[in-house]
Image (tube, rainbow, N blue to C red):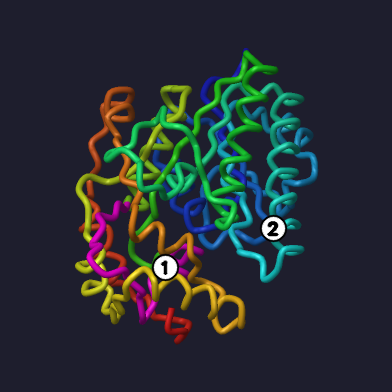
Amino acid sequence: MAQQGKVVAVTGASGYVGTKLLARLEQESGLRKLVAFDVNPLPLPVHNIAFYRKNVSEPIEDELNDQGATTLVHLAFNARRGANRREVAAIHEENLETLRSVMASCASARVTHLIYLSSHTVYGAHSDNPVPISDDAPMRPSLDFPYAYDKHQCELLLEEFAQAQEEVKITVLRSCTVLGHGADTWATRSFFRPWLLGVLDYDPPMQFVYDDDLARVIAIMIQQEIPGTFNVAGDGVVHYREMAKIIKSKLINLPPFVAYPLVRLCWGLRLQREASSNGLDQVRWPIVMSTGKLHKATGYRFWHTALESLTAFANSAYLYKDPSPF
């Protein structure tokens, strides 16, 4: 007699979101087993799990077959920004090849549902962005923002995969910045700093999602097998100046004709490798997403607002790790 219940595999399982997701899935009913992949060990013990310490750029169909995986959540992604064009290109190729390998393994192992965690940054920061921006808006990431560009390219690969593998349901979640107690990601390290650069006359709204809320959304997608592309963001916004006060950052506001050349100069001289002209674009033209499609499809209501997510992060044991002025 066939065993009942889903077997859920998670790549990048030892990361910040992966750890939160495994904790959530451990509490879900109807799941027969969890399968985890990461090059790093799991930071917390998890019941009823098969863990493989492995880079998923290598084939994983044998492991998926052995465990009878029915669903895979792909979180593995190199978010590091390269120090030069060669590193940027290498990271780009790594992210795409990893996804190609995972998709091929899913097809071979007959996984029926693939969930991919994307980013709101795929929309790009543009002066003509609608507010809010809907899930069907075109993706227009800046080439100067490798993270967003790589996420965009990965989504295009998933579209091709969906056409070739019609029996596999594809879910793409375009999430805003994920926060919570002890959040430590590329976004928190690069964006929440002791000094923030702003642009005069701009106080843009920012969206955040609490980590547990994101984990619950993914769990719902797993349980209900909902395909499609969905924006994910907590209710409400926090304006840029208010955010700076909450995280106790000193905000330096400059006119655009000073801010952009200054950032480019500091970047060119390698005085800093975080702030970019694209970052200033995001301050001027933030990406504020509509989540109506997600609410309609799932019925889910977020437990935490954007302000509560940011406050939880600010009140945690987080400490600035880099004194760079940007």
Disc 2 residue type? Val
Left or right: residue 96 compared with residue 73: right
First along the sequence among labels 1 and 2:
2
Disc 1 residue type? Phe
- For the point 46% across and 24% down, which residue is it? 228
Secondary structure, mark 1, is helix
Whether 56 is drawn above or below 33: the answer is below
* Quadrant assignment for the N terminus: top right
- For the point 52% across and 46% down, which residue is it? 141
In whole angstroms, how far apart are the C-alphas of marks 1 and 2? 26 Å
Position of residue 62 measured from the top left corner of the image (x, y, whole percent): 79, 34
Do residues under tags 1 and 2 come within 8 Å of each other at their CB atoms?
no
In the picture, the disc for residue 191 is 1
Left or right: residue 302 compared with residue 75: left
Secondary structure, mark 2, is loop
- For the point 36% across and 74% down, which residue is it? 197
Q: Is residue 113 magenta?
A: no
**Number of other residues with Cα within 10 Å of mark 2, as a class: few under 14, some 14 to 19, many 20 or more:** some
Position of residue 195 measured from the top left corner of the image (x, y, whole percent): 36, 80
Left or right: residue 126 compared with residue 4: left
The residue at which mark 2 appears reads as 39
Residue 275 vs residue 41, the one in the foreground? 275
From which residue to which does the magenta span run?
184-208
Q: Is residue 186 magenta?
A: yes
Residue 199 vs residue 65, the one in the foreground? 199
Identify the residue at the far bottom of this view. 323
In the picture, the disc for residue 208 is none
Whether 171 is drawn above or below 186: the answer is above
Position of residue 31 measured from the top left corner of the image (x, y, whole percent): 49, 31
Residue 239 vs residue 104, the one in the foreground? 239
